[in-house]
Amino acid sequence: MALLTLSRRPDSQQLALFDAWLTPQDWVLLSGDARVMLWQANPTQAQGCIRRSDAQSLGGQPHSDWTQIDDTEWLQLTIDHTPLVHW
């Protein structure tokens, strides 16, 4: 199970790569400039999440594809998943 941290919006070629690589058992974490994806459907088949503090700082109603997690849950994801990929 992988954890992919997105720090910017992926382009179409990157999404194609993620589609081939990610599975429903993997996780995508939104961070940095990718946090604005919070308001749209998750474009991958992986489970999507965003840290609760990031979601609250952006405001608005997040799309139901993105689970809000706290810092303890974020730490557990980093412990439980290999590889950890930052994009």
Image (cartoon, rainbow, N blue to C red):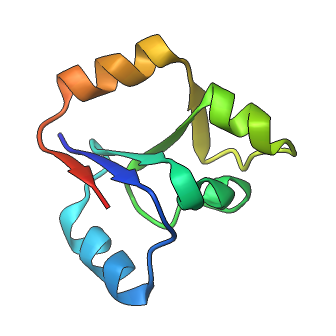
Residue at (39, 59) in percent of width and height: 45
Q: Residue furthest right?
A: 60
> Seen in the image, is 66 located left or right of residue 11?
right
Whole-percent x, y for residue 79 in the image: 20, 21
Quadrant in the rendering for residue 72: top left
Q: Residue most toward the bottom?
A: 13
Residue most extreme to the left: 82
- Residue drawn at x 51%, y 48% as measured from the top left: 31
Q: Report x, y in % for residue 68.
A: 61, 30
Left-right relation of 68 to 13: right
Q: In which quarter of the image is residue 11?
A: bottom left
Q: Name the quadrant of the C terminus.
A: bottom left
- 59 vs 19, nearest the viewer: 59
Which residue occupies 48% across, 17% down? 71
Outermost residue, front side = 32
Indicate the position of residue 14 as horizontal and vertical percent values: 33, 79
- In front: 85, or 41? 85
- Dividing the picture into quarters, in which one does residue 1 lie? top left
**Marker count (numbered):** 0
In the image, residue 67 above or below residue 38: above
| 23 displayed left or right of 68 | left
Vertical side of 39 occupied by 25: above or below? above
The residue located at (51%, 39%) in the rendering is 49
Name above or below for residue 14 compared with residue 57: below
Instruction: Say which of 46 and 76 sits in front.
Output: 76
x then y, percent, for residue 4? 30, 50
